[in-house]
Amino acid sequence: MKAGKGSASWERVRTMQVENEIRLETTESVTVLDIEGDVTVASEPFFKEAYEKANKQGTANIVFKFDENAYINSGGIAILIQLLSLARINNQKVVITGLSDHFKKIFNMVGITKIARIYSTVDEARKGLCD
């Protein structure tokens, strides 16, 4: 685990593809999963590992931060729904940021926005978790 700025800590979970990475940033009561690259069924073990690390840290609030250029297919959406369900079972609040307008519409259509609110920036997402 690498120390970040202030009280933040960083941890990386890599996929087999170099261009796909999940970084965990933990500050106080919020853990940000900074997701780079496409989200597909092949991403499942890496998302689960990142979520398990966040959960073991005892975080109550999670931000899924996507790269605006990310591609998310139906398998990736299924993974996200599984993680959102786990977070709900664990009494954790999850919010999402960084999505393109296209994926904001898709997440709304499939009902993800009923489980997790979507924000434009990480700062807005952090504030939203405090509401």
Image (tube, rainbow, N blue to C red):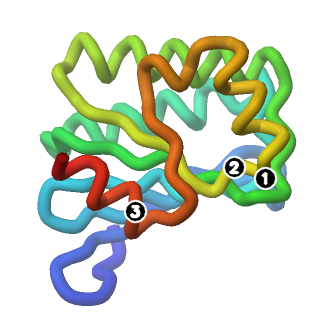
Q: Amino acid at mark 1?
A: Gly
**Upstream in the sequence, badge 2 or badge 1?**
1
Q: Which residue is mark 2?
A: 99
Q: Are marks 2 and 1 in contact (CB under 8 Å)?
A: no
Q: Quadrant of residue 67?
A: bottom right
Q: Is residue 103 shown above or below 127? A: above
Nearer to us in this view, 94 or 111: 111
Instruction: Point out the frontmost of discs 3 and 2.
Output: 3
Q: Amino acid at mark 2?
A: Leu
Bin the neighbour count of mark 3 within 10 Å (Cα to Cα): few under 14, some 14-19, many 20 and up.
Answer: few
Residue 51 badge: none
Instruction: Point out the frontmost of discs 3 and 1.
Output: 3
User: How far across and how far down the image is residue 93, in percent?
Assistant: 27, 33
- C-alpha gap between disc 3 and disc 1: 22 Å
Q: Are marks 3 and 2 in contact (CB under 8 Å)?
A: no
Q: Secondary structure at mark 3?
A: helix
Which quadrant does the N terminus fall into? bottom left
Nearer to us in this view, 37 or 118: 118
User: How far across and how far down the image is residue 100, in percent?
Assistant: 77, 51
User: How far across and how far down the image is residue 94, in percent?
Assistant: 36, 36
In this rendering, position of residue 49 left or right of residue 80: left
Q: Secondary structure at mark 2?
A: loop
**Upstream in the sequence, badge 3 or badge 1?**
1
Q: Which residue is mark 3?
A: 124
Residue 37 badge: 1
- C-alpha gap between disc 2 and disc 1: 12 Å
- Residue at x 35%, y 76% (from the top left corner): 2
Q: Is residue 52 shown above or below 114? A: below
User: How far across and how far down the image is residue 85, in percent?
Assistant: 40, 12
Q: Amino acid at mark 3?
A: Glu
